[in-house]
Each structure stands twice: as structure tokens, then as C-alpha cells.
Amino acid sequence: MIRDFELIKKILLYAEKNLKAADILQVKLDGYSNDEIAYNTKLLYEAGFLECMDVSDSSGPEFLIKSITWVGHDFIDNCINDTAWKKTKLSFGEKLQNISISVFSGVLTEFCKKQIG
């Protein structure tokens, strides 16, 4: 499995749009397998962007989203800036898969700050 920053963005935006108070959310996104979604949701949980519940079983991995953390909301606020998002991805080029989420998030934040002035 690979860390997929586009999928990470989609998972967070899906959660922000669909998660209700006292709810548990299962993410379903067209074009992605359950394994890809589960793996990247797990990464978001481990990075502190989401609170999740691991309901994996013998049929495969699955993480249900309980809430978005403060850090997760900050990342969402930055990633909805399409210009900053594209510039961040382009700045890493082919090395994108080898960049940590904290480094990616830091560069994304800097591009957002530059747009503010």
C-alpha cells in the first residue's frame, strides 16, 4: 500500500461533509478500493488528523471515523485552497510518495500564508 495524498484529501473532505455529531462514518469513494481507503484512513488516524475505530476483521482492514481532530481541521482548511494544494504537490514532484505528512502539511501551510500576503 502507498500513502496517497489525493486520497487523504478526499477522505478528510468526505468526513467533514458527512460526519454528524455522535456518528461513526464509513468512507466510500469511487475509484478507490476498501483496502486503499482503510490504509490511508489508518494513516490519518496515526498522524492525529482523525479519531477512528478499528473494526478490521478476517475480511480485511476497516477504520470507521469518529471525529476530525483540530489538526485535521487545520489541514482541511489548507487543502481546500486548490492553488496552494497544487503548488505543494508540484514542489515535491516525483518525491511526493517519500514525504511525511508533517512536511507536506508544513509546505502547504506556507503556500497558504503566501497567498494571504
Image (spheres, rainbow, N blue to C red):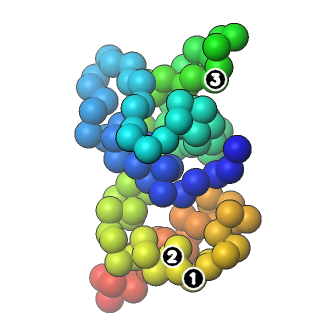
As drawn, 82 above or below 44: below
Foreground of the two, 17 or 57? 57
Residue 61: image quadrant is top right
Farthest top residue? 58
Q: Amino acid at mark 3?
A: Pro
Q: Is residue 12 above or below residue 82?
A: above
Q: Secondary structure at mark 3?
A: loop
> Residue 113, position in %: x, y?
39, 79
Determine which residue is flagged by label 1: 91
Q: Name the residue that disc number 2 marks.
A: 88
User: In the image as oriented, which residue stretches furthest toward the right?
Assistant: 98
Residue on which disc 3 sits: 61
Compare marks 1 and 3 and give the one earlier in the sequence: 3
**Lower sequence index among marks 3 and 2:** 3
Q: Quadrant of residue 75?
A: bottom left
Q: Residue at x 57, y 23 (%)?
A: 62
Q: Position of residue 23 (x, y in %)?
A: 33, 18
- Determine whether label 2 and label 1 are within 8 Å by CB: yes
Q: Could you tell me which quadrant the N terminus lies in?
A: top right
Marking on residue 4: none
Q: Position of residue 52 (x, y in %)?
A: 53, 26
